[in-house]
Amino acid sequence: MSAERRVEALGLTLPEPPRPLAAYVPSVRAGDLLFVSGVIPVRAGQPVCRGVVGGEVSGEEGYEAARVAVLNALAVIRHAAGSLDRVRRIVRMTGYVASREGFVDQPAVINGASDVLVEIFGEAGRHARVAVGVAALPMGVPVELELIVQLLPEDSQAR
Amino acid sequence: MSAERRVEALGLTLPEPPRPLAAYVPSVRAGDLLFVSGVIPVRAGQPVCRGVVGGEVSGEEGYEAARVAVLNALAVIRHAAGSLDRVRRIVRMTGYVASREGFVDQPAVINGASDVLVEIFGEAGRHARVAVGVAALPMGVPVELELIVQLLPEDSQAR
Amino acid sequence: MSAERRVEALGLTLPEPPRPLAAYVPSVRAGDLLFVSGVIPVRAGQPVCRGVVGGEVSGEEGYEAARVAVLNALAVIRHAAGSLDRVRRIVRMTGYVASREGFVDQPAVINGASDVLVEIFGEAGRHARVAVGVAALPMGVPVELELIVQLLPEDSQAR
């Protein structure tokens, strides 16, 4: 099943691609790599959740926030590549988790995003990953994600 | 107008390329991508500003620090590529902002660097971007930047 | 001397490649670049050190933790590439140091990893580097590393 069909089958709705808050762009392609700007858990531009994990935000809420954030990344990728079916591989994701001192289960939070990628892309969605706990994130959200994606060559058949 | 001429027209002076503080190098090229080591707001090796944003350092001072930091990155790029005119595209910048708990406007701080990139490179300066708030940075500075840059092929005419 | 022989000569033992804690993989190759997932200072899956640098953990202990962490990265690289002798260049390393407020010598900590890379790979081990201080890291460890490595072309002679 193609990635786009799987999005449909899973009942997921991708948001409008988020608009950058400043003098940058949602993604840049260099060769077959697409570098995606940091995405946060917003719907219609509004954060779905604010606070630090281990504080106001629980690990479960962080997991859900990571799911919402990665949908924004997918919206950017679809917009840049024309279709999610142009994705050859999710190469790497860095997950930043706003963390109260002592909260050290960043991997469980970022799983919210990793799980979506594997649901949609299957083996091609298995990525290298980094998860770290940071002091604070834009708009006070608990999670920010950064992705590098490998696209199919421009002239290749969509999968 | 070429990037080098624009640096001149803007009255900007690039510093000496910063010397790494240890067993690493200012940049590494792999294919047409140049990976630039983290740069901080130093002039002649001395921080122009210390502290965390939202604490001792205001957002405006953070913005200025980001401007100074990105000039150090440009010095590294010029040194590695021979000229800023060899830059095809600024691909991605990650901006780390040392942030007091509760300071969540990292994007406004990192705009100090993004604005310089667009002033100098125009459309080619529009980059993918990540902005996060961290606990502390080397030498106590409020901002650190990491860039990935795409260079023109070695044998191409300088723009 | 080849990298593999140097590992031997230095009396270093690489651990088993660490197993990801979730729905991701230890590394992903895209073209000649290998993106390595975040590695932490574990032996046999257990952290060799916990706490934040500048707090429970001293700078020297952080340096030692960075040495252990980079051995895990090397184990991943060897497993992915078949041999460390397939490494053309260590391109970039990002070092995250869990830091108490006021601890600003992240570079000295990350040197623990950089020094090992240069010991093993010589000039090819000199990398671009970023060092930042973060709030918290998975399992409570003081150091996490992320590497991008350039491999030799598949059909080239091993060095």
Image: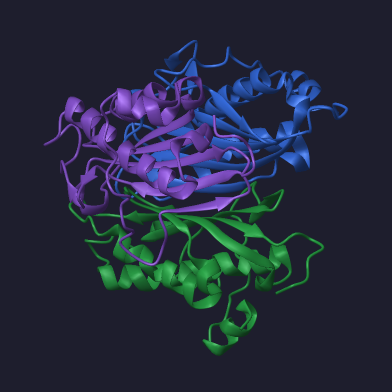
Chain colours: A blue, B purple, C green
Apparent side of residue B45 relative to residue A145 in the rendered image (left or right): left
The residue under the point 57% across, 82% down is C7
Q: Nearer the viewer, residue B100 or A8?
A: B100
Residue C44: percent from left, percent from top: 55, 73
Q: Place residue B2 in its image quadrant.
A: top left
Residue C96 versus residue B98 in the image, above or below:
below
Side of A102 relative to C72 (left or right): left
Estimate the x, y position of residue B34 in percent, counting from the top left: 52, 46
Q: Is residue C108 left or right of residue B120?
A: left
Q: Nearer the viewer, residue B41 or A93?
A: B41
Residue depicted at x 30% and y 61%: B21
A65 or C41: nearer the eye? C41
**Can you name the residue that lies furthest to the left here?**
B56
Q: Quadrant of residue A50?
A: top left
Give residue B28's position: percent from left, percent from top: 51, 54
Quadrant occupied by the N terminus of chain A: top right
Residue C91, quarter of picture = bottom right
Residue B8 visible from this viewpoint: yes
Q: Position of residue A150 (x, y in %)?
A: 69, 37
The residue drawn where x is 56% and y is 22% is: A72
**Residue B1 versus residue C62 in the image, above or below:** above
Whether residue B97 is visible, yes or no, is: no
Q: Quadrant of the C terminus of chain A?
A: top right
Relative to B88, does residue C95 appear above or below in the rendering?
Answer: below
